Image (cartoon, rainbow, N blue to C red):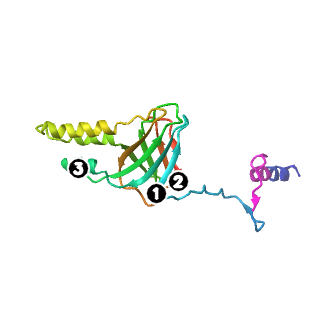
Amino acid sequence: MKRLLLPIAVTVILTTGCGSPTPAASPDVAGTPSTATPAPSKTIMGPGEYTFTVPSGGKGTLTIPAKPVAELDSLRALVKGEPVTYVTGTVDNRDGSEAINMYGVSIFTPEGEELKYKGADSYVDGLRDRLPENAPSETYNRFIGASNKHQIFVKPLAKHDFVLVGPAVPKEITGITVYPTGGFGEVQATPAS
């Protein structure tokens, strides 16, 4: 009789996970236990108007994508740069308590790809670096002037428009992250109502 108890005890321990209780699966509508974890739902958005709010009190709007900016397209053509997409917007910092420089925007696709858009000032600086060494000073100064024009710090109590530059905007977007005051402190943009 003792020999029969040992195999039965081992079988009971193995099938119950060494005595630890296993959580019971919750039944679904039909009464069958469901063990699958539901996938997180993703809201699919598209190009259009978006808004964001900065913790320090500033607010912004984005147009994704925006119409081409003639001045920047002209400079791009001078150095035979590749076509780009523009994101424009307005920062209203009249209720804010710190300067906003619109460091960048990231757009995420359903496939998990991150598309980055940077300020027009750094884009123009990159274009200027492609000028030949013997470029006329007037041409060089056009790039300097455009870069300075787009190097925006929207102080508290102020409101200003801005331009960001990046790749083509996807048709499906799952998230938009705005970096209003540098590479940290990001906020999420949501569709404008």
**Residue at image location 18% in from the left, 48% down from the top:** 78
Question: Where is residue 151 drawn, in percent x and y?
Answer: 34, 36
Q: Is residue 188 visible in this depiction of the protein?
A: no
Which of the two labelled residues, at mark 2 and mark 1, occupies the earlier sequence position?
A: 1
- Residue 125 rendering spot, x and y as whole percentages: 27, 38
Residue 23 belongs to the span the image colors magenta:
yes
The residue that mark 3 highlights is: 74
- Look at the numbered disc 1 and give the secondary structure of its residue: strand
Real-space Cα distance between discs 2 and 1? 8 Å
What residue did someone put label 1 on? Answer: 48
Which residue is at the far left? 134
User: SS for tag 2?
Assistant: loop
> Where's the C terminus, which quadrant?
bottom right
Q: Say which quarter of the image contains residue 66.
A: bottom left
Q: Secondary structure at mark 3?
A: helix
Magenta span covers which residues? 10-27
Task: Choose between 4 and 67: the one closer to the eye.
Answer: 67
Residue at screen point 52% across, 31% down: 97
Mark 1 crowdedness (10 Å alpha carbons): few <14, some 14-19, many ≥20? few
Amino acid at pointer 3: Ser
Q: Write down the residue under mark 2.
A: 192
Q: Are marks 1 and 3 in contact (CB under 8 Å)?
A: no
